[in-house]
Structures are given as C-alpha cells and as structure tokens.
Amino acid sequence: MDYVYNLDFYDVLILNKRIASREESNAKAKLRRLQMLTVAIHTSEPNEFIEELDRSIEGEESFDEIGDLEGLEKLKIKRQGYKVR
C-alpha cells in the first residue's frame, strides 16, 4: 500500500494506462474466442478445434499445423457457393 501512496501523478497515469490496456487485450481475446467458437460449429471435429483454440489463447504450443491457406481458400469458395444458390 505504501507503494501506491508514493506514486506521483505521472506514475498513476502510466499505471492506469497499463490497466486499461490489459483489460482491452483480455476483452479482445475473449471476443476472438467467441468468434472462433462460432466457426467451430462448421468444422468436422469441433471439440478438437475448441481445444486448439484454447491452447493458442493460453499461449501453449500447438499440436497441429495452423495456417493451411489452401484449405482456407477452398472453404471460402465452398461457402461462397452456398450463398449463390
């Protein structure tokens, strides 16, 4: 508590900015997770997808290769085909 009392105005502003930044980062991570959970519905194995997503949010090492651009492009074309019909 003594540390807080010894802070000057500039230190308080910096501390406040760091707290706000941390809260914003946490909120963005939660939003990304919710977005990815909605995508998980369309995967063939949603439980594995959700586990992989949790590992990436926690900063743990991935068990799968991430970033299959060719597969992503095929999925995009497939979904665009659904919209046309």
Image: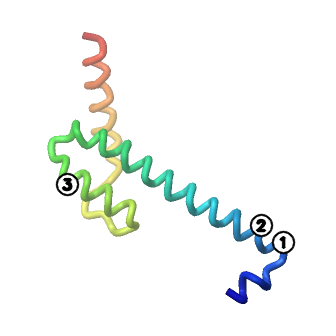
Please state which of residues 24 and 45 is positioned toward the viewer in this rendering.
24
SS of the residue under disc 3 = helix
| Horizontal relation, residue 24 to residue 5: left or right | left
Q: Residue furthest bottom?
A: 2
Quarter of the rendering occupied by the C terminus: top left
Secondary structure beneath label 2:
helix
Q: Type of residue at label 2?
A: Leu
Mark nearest the camera among 1 and 3 is 1
User: Looking at the image, is mark 3 or mark 2 earlier in the sequence?
Assistant: 2
Mark 1 closeness class: few <14, some 14–19, many ≥20 residues within 10 Å: few
- The quadrant the N terminus occupies is bottom right
Say which residue label 3 marks.
48
Give the residue pinned by disc 1: 9
Residue for badge 2: 13
Residue ID at (76%, 71%): 12
Q: Residues within 10 Å of mark 2 (few under 14, many from 20)?
A: few
